[in-house]
Image (tube, rainbow, N blue to C red):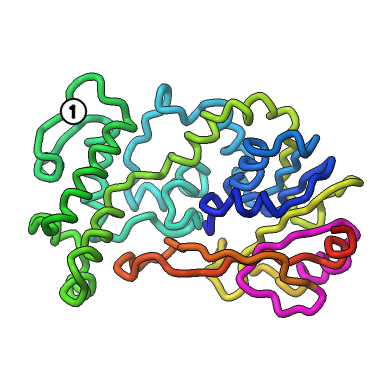
Amino acid sequence: MGSKSTIAEWVISKIPKAKHFYDLFGGGLSITHALIEKRSKDFEVFHFNEIRPGICELIEDAIAGKYSYDVFKPKWISRDEFHAQKEKDVFIKMCWSFGNNGQTYMFSSEIEPYKKSMHQAVIFNEFDDLAKKVFGFSEFRDGYSITQRRLFLRNKIKFYRTTKIPDFLFRFLSESQKKELDKIDNLRRLEQLERLGRLQQLEQLERLNDSKKLKSQKSQIIFSQKSFEEVEIENDAIIYCDPPYQLTQKYDKNKTFNHESFLSWAANHKTPILISEYQISDSRFKLFAAKQKRSMLSSNKLNGALDKTEKLYANAAFIARF
């Protein structure tokens, strides 16, 4: 949720060298992964912390290859199965929830049948009548990799950009979406349809498995599942924090993140800290860098991506040192 993968290189370009790097709200490993890929020589030890149960195990399993397509073919997870299994299986909880929030199912009830049809065709080469209409054939010939199948689907959807959404797909849109489609141009309509065919639940886990540097330096990553203030910080360290943003959707509807307590902790810490946020009005922190970002985390896909300004704020220890 709120992944930094699209701006990871920008973020890591702002992080100074140190012996220890701490990623205290690690999420999907985007920043730690980018540092290991691009700047592994600038740090001796990487400390990855994520308080949510199962995330560290999920990432370690991904690095070890558990979710490689060579050995793992993800079955379709229905809405009912998601809610029945989400507290028992962290893969289902995170990879089949909307925005990886771990709480709500990935797809709307209207679009779920379409998604299932595309999933079964791409992953298992099983075509129902809908898949046959979308693809224009009844099966993939031998030799097509999973990646090639997904690219074929994406290209097919892009083809619709030059024409129009086929009538047989309209039944998967809600009434409000259909009304909205009447108000927007054909390009915007097909941006909506293109997103329906992306099938990206496993892309991040695949990247972790494919990272040779990540595998070779796994011994340099220390994983922990603690609250941010419980992590013991070594000397000669840089701390990066990507906490739940203020005034945005919660990671866990049953838990409240105390932003004031976090900011007080960060302001008084003697270690240099960089914090990702949209806005921090607390005068104890200085705006260090800012970058425009396209945010796709929206349940109303017809509104498209939203422009957001990602900002990095520094505590007094960071300003004093750098």
Q: Quarter of the image containing the C terminus?
A: bottom right
Decide: is 187 above or below 49: below
Residue 31 x %, y %: 63, 47
Residue 247 x %, y %: 58, 76
Residue 230 appears in which quarter of the rendering? bottom right
Which residue is at the front of the view, 259 or 267? 267
Decide: is 309 above or below 135: below
Q: Check disc 1 and give the amino acid type.
A: Phe
Residue 315 appears in which quarter of the rendering? bottom right
The magenta stretch spans residue 224: no
Residue 210 x %, y %: 52, 29
| Residue 51 shows up from this direction | no
Which residue is at the front of the view, 305 or 9? 9
Tell me the magenta residue range. 261-284
Q: Which residue is mark 1?
A: 140
Q: Residue at x 73, y 51 (%)?
A: 15
Q: Secondary structure at mark 1?
A: loop
Q: Residue at x 75, y 74 (%)?
A: 260
Q: Residue at x 67, y 65 (%)?
A: 289
